[in-house]
């Protein structure tokens, strides 16, 4: 890849991580882990170099093509099924492999795949859901990196319907682990206030791969 900048791998002087959930799981928000210039460089890389495609899903028997675009990478080209559709992973780029290693050190997990999401602006979001695919196993550890426009990320308890929110900043990391997926749903709500793109990377470990 020919670039006029170097992609940084983050800084070590970020704020104190905090659990944004009051109970029944851990979702640790680390805040921004990259200097602004590094985060900007990563965003340019993702927007220019990733082969984005519109996501597809089968919802109540209907085939849906989303406005949001995705890409999926992994240790090898294994298959991943969610929302009734099967995707085949691309093999890591060298940049993504290095970023994965840094995220593993921060998050305390080991990951063999990453789903990347591109939200062009606030008109694109993600409805309430939880990441409970069979291949993720129980009490999965999912590390979510955000670059670009700051977006609100909501949690909703499955039983009490209690809601909590966190603003995902440019270059920030959120790690969902423990009972989070079993006890909480999450969403990225649409908003007319955001006009810039956001790229989200969710690093995960698929078992049986």
Image: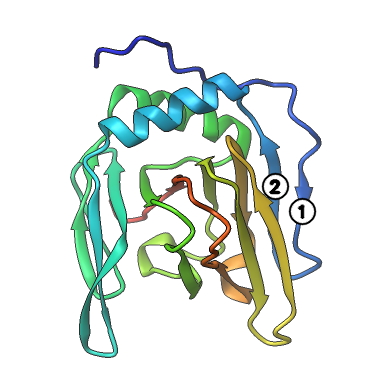
Q: Secondary structure at mark 2?
A: strand
Residue 99 appears left or right of 59: right
Residue tagged 2: 29
> Residue 171 bears which disc, if any?
none
Question: Residue 30 at x, y = what percent?
Answer: 70, 40
At x 70% / y 50%, what residue is drawn?
Answer: 28
At x 62% / y 22%, what residue is drawn?
Answer: 35
| Residue 179 visible in rendering | no
At x 63% / y 43%, what residue is drawn?
Answer: 169
Q: Is residue 162 above or below residue 10?
A: below
Q: Contact, CB < 8 Å: mark 1 with mark 2?
A: yes
- The picture quadrant where one finds residue 67 is bottom left
Question: Residue 208 at x, y = what percent?
Answer: 30, 56
Mark 1 and mark 2 lie on one chain; the one further toward the N terminus is: 1
How many numbered tags mark residues here? 2
Residue tagged 1: 19
Question: Residue 193 at x, y = what percent?
Answer: 58, 58
Residue 24 appears left or right of 138: right
Q: Secondary structure at mark 1?
A: strand
| Residue 47 visible in rendering | yes
Q: Residues within 10 Å of mark 1 (few under 14, many from 20)?
A: some
Q: Is residue 181 above or below residue 96?
A: below
Q: Residues within 10 Å of mark 2 (few under 14, many from 20)?
A: many
Residue 74 appears left or right of 122: left
Gap in angstroms between the C-alphas marked 1 and 2: 6 Å
Q: Which quadrant would the N terminus be assigned to in this image?
A: top left
At x 55% / y 67%, what residue is drawn?
Answer: 189
Residue 51 appears left or right of 160: left
């Amino acid at each position: 890849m020919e670039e006029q900048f170097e992609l940084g791998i983050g800084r070590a002087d970020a704020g104190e991580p905090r659990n944004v959930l009051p109970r029944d799981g851990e979702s640790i928000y680390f805040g921004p882990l990259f200097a602004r210039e590094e985060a900007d460089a990563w965003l340019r890389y993702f927007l220019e170099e990733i082969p984005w495609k519109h996501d597809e899903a089968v919802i109540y028997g209907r085939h849906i093509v989303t406005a949001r675009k995705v890409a999926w990478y992994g240790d090898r080209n294994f298959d991943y099924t969610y929302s009734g559709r099967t995707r085949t992973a691309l093999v890591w780029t060298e940049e993504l492999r290095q970023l994965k290693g840094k995220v593993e050190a921060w998050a305390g997990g080991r990951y063999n795949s990453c789903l990347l999401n591109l939200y062009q602006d606030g008109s694109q979001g993600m409805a309430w859901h939880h990441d409970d695919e069979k291949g993720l196993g129980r009490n999965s550890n999912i590390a979510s990196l955000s670059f670009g426009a700051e977006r609100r990320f909501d949690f909703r308890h499955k039983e009490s319907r209690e809601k909590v929110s966190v603003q995902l900043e440019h270059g920030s990391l959120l790690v969902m682990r423990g009972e989070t997926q079993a006890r909480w749903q999450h969403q990225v709500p649409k908003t007319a206030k955001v006009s810039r793109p956001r790229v989200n990377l969710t690093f995960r470990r698929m078992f049986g791969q």
